[in-house]
């Protein structure tokens, strides 16, 4: 291989970071085993019970390094306006200077790994290649499950192919003879998750955790890719992709975007409650989408694995995820049982007898208040292990998308499901989604925290321009070939604060209506907010729900919506003059429809 630009970049980083040695990852199973065994020997990983959970490992992070750090995440565009009002910005020259000083000899005493990886099936026209340089062996083993890595990627790159440069260091150089910690990282004020969109460059420093360190995922596949998508006319979205087949064998694909804690992974692998229907999973987090020559929108999952939140995942909530992580998996910050298996809150059974080691490494007090697993503890598993992985999940052409679903966690106001009147109206719906938060959760006023298209922390440029990009993609297109856009809310509550809708597998009833609507069938009535299911259009067979609750599930309350409209106006102010006027027009139309019905 003589990719001169790659070789000279690796040389440059080696000289800057001063590692003890450089290893080019081939992506083989043998390499994976070697790196894992070394980490077990060094006390950084625990090998789990081989009989119960074959070839699986547990890591415990530093207690200061447990999640993405949004306040240390930067979009370093040429100017602040380009990054927009929702991103942190530092001028590129200044940030590069600061970080170069941090990177200087930061890998002392460590191995520098070079990981060639492909986001998307290798060689697909929708895929892109990245190279992650990291001093974290934990990153290497996770990247092998989450992406396609190794020699075959270098082959695809050739001697002049384009790649996104991803530099990562845990930011903890080792002095001679210094004993390494089990989770090296830097203090919060030295953590930087930086993106240089104009250089297609990612610089991450100081954290070893998840989205801060596995740079293919949020940093590349969303933040940098969203900029590439804008420039190249496609979409990089924070969406699951699922295939759904009706009893006649007709199949459609949907994508869906939700803010965090709405159960995206659960929906992606759902087991339908209605007989004869089947859901299969293409991806649970990210969709890269492009219009084909036939005018339809096609999606690929750029990832090759799941990096899911463990707590709450059980045989009840998501049996397919539980089976996906039955072997060859990595766990981070879950609890450890006495027989060397993992456990977490909401796994569906009480912690087994014997000593439980919590995520901090201490013995867990069962009667105490502390959690055994960190609320953001994770599993990593290859998508190929999912029992309902879609047969087309690695199709290089992608899968054709019939519906785009937005959602959020709303106790009131938003009905179980409604359909946008048009692409433009659908973009409006996507731009206002959000979840209700309690005062305690944000330490501020309780209310709706809006997370447009679930991209608020992941858009690599000005979000006003991002809305415009969505609108632009729908213009001058054959509307009959565009996916229909829907909004769902599984989380509506009754006056006693109880969830009205059973959710989970019963959400297949909603997916069925969406399927039928996308198919030109399915009965709907026009409402102020869009098309809602006609009476009895949602299949409720075998479900016990009383008619009063059903009415409440679909209620559109004028006063609630007037408040909603005011709240959307506030939300829109944030984007200033970059807010496309079409979205304000949609809001004014909504306002008018409610005023008319005074
Ligand atoms: O993932 C969820 N989904 C989507 C499933 C495909 N969750 C979990 C959210 C946290 C990640 C849900 N929680 C869903 C849902 O549809 N709905 C709810 C709310 C709910 C919780 C418990 C019950 C019902 C609804 N249980 C009983 O009524 C017994
Ligand atoms: Mn996500």
Image (spheres, rainbow, N blue to C red):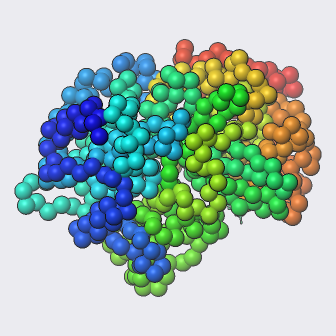
Q: Quadrant of the C terminus?
A: top right
Where residue 303 appears, x then y in whole percent? Answer: 50, 47
Where residue 450 appears, x then y in whole percent? Answer: 58, 36
Camera-nearest residue between 309 and 22 = 22
Determine the residue located farthest toward the right in the rendered image: 535
The part of the image, by quadrant, that contains residue 196 is top left
Where residue 380 appears, x then y in whole percent? Answer: 46, 59
Q: Is residue 495 visible?
A: no
What residue appears at the point 47 percent right and 27 percent down from the top-left corner?
227
The relative height of residue 358 versus residue 220 in the rendered view (above or below) is below
What residue appears at the point 88 percent right and 60 percent down from the top-left corner?
541
Judged from the image, the quadrant occupied by ligand 1 is bottom right
Where residue 482 appears, x then y in whole percent? Answer: 73, 30
The relative height of residue 522 versus residue 316 in the rendered view (above or below) is above
Query: Horizontally, is 133 left or right of 126 in the view?
Result: left
What residue appears at the point 75 percent right and 34 percent down from the top-left corner?
484
- Total labels drawn: 0
């Amino acid at each position: 291989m003589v990719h001169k630009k790659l070789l000279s970049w690796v040389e440059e980083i080696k000289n800057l970071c001063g590692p003890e040695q450089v290893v080019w990852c081939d992506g083989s199973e043998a390499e994976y085993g070697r790196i894992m065994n070394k980490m077990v020997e060094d006390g950084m990983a625990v090998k789990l019970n081989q009989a119960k959970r074959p070839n699986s490992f547990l890591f415990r992070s530093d207690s200061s390094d447990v999640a993405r750090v949004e306040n240390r995440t930067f979009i370093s565009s040429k100017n602040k306006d380009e990054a927009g009002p929702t991103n942190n910005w530092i001028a590129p020259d200044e940030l590069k200077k600061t970080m170069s000083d941090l990177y200087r000899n930061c890998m002392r005493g460590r191995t520098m790994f070079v990981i060639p990886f492909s986001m998307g099936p290798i060689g697909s026209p929708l895929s892109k290649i990245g190279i992650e340089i990291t001093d974290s062996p934990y990153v290497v083993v996770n990247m092998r499950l989450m992406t396609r890595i190794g020699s075959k990627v270098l082959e695809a790159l050739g001697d002049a192919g384009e790649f996104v440069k991803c530099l990562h260091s845990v930011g903890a150089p080792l002095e001679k003879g210094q004993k390494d910690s089990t989770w090296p990282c830097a203090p919060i004020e030295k953590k930087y998750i930086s993106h240089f969109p104009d250089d297609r460059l990612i610089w991450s420093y100081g954290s070893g955790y998840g989205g801060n360190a596995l740079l293919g995922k949020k940093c590349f596949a969303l933040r940098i890719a969203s900029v590439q998508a804008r420039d190249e006319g496609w979409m990089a979205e924070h969406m699951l992709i699922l295939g759904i087949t009706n009893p006649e064998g007709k199949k459609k694909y949907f994508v869906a975007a939700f803010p965090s804690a709405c159960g995206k992974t659960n929906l992606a692998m759902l087991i339908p409650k209605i007989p004869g229907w089947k859901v299969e999973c293409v991806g649970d987090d990210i969709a890269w989408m492009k219009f084909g020559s036939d005018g339809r929108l096609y999606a690929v999952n750029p990832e090759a694995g799941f990096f899911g939140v463990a707590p709450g995942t059980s045989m009840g909530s998501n049996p397919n995820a539980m089976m996906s992580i039955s072997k060859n998996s990595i766990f981070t910050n879950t609890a450890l049982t006495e027989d060397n298996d993992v456990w977490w809150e909401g796994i569906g059974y009480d912690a087994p007898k014997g000593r439980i080691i919590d995520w901090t490494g201490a013995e867990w007090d069962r009667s105490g208040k502390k959690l055994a697993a960190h609320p953001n503890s994770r599993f990593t598993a290859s998508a190929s292990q999912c029992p309902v992985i879609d047969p087309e999940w690695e199709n290089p052409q992608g899968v054709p998308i019939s519906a785009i679903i937005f959602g959020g966690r709303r106790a009131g106001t938003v009905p179980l499901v409604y359909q946008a009147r048009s692409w433009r109206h659908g973009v409006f719906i996507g731009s206002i989604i959000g979840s209700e938060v309690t005062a305690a959760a944000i330490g501020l006023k309780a209310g709706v925290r809006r997370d447009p298209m679930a991209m608020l922390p992941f858009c690599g440029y000005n979000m006003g321009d991002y809305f415009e990009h969505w609108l632009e993609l729908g213009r001058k297109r054959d509307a009959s070939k565009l996916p229909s856009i829907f909004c769902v809310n599984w989380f509506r509550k009754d006056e006693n604060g109880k969830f009205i809708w059973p959710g989970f597998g019963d959400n297949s009833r909603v997916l069925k209506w969406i399927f039928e609507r996308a198919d030109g069938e399915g009965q709907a009535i026009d409402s102020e907010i869009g098309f809602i299911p006609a009476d009895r259009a949602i299949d409720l067979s075998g479900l016990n729900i009383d008619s009063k609750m059903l009415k409440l599930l679909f209620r559109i309350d004028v006063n609630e919506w007037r408040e909603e409209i005011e709240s959307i106006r506030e939300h829109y102010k944030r984007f200033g003059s970059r807010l496309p006027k079409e979205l304000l027009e949609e809001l004014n139309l909504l306002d008018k429809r409610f005023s008319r019905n005074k």
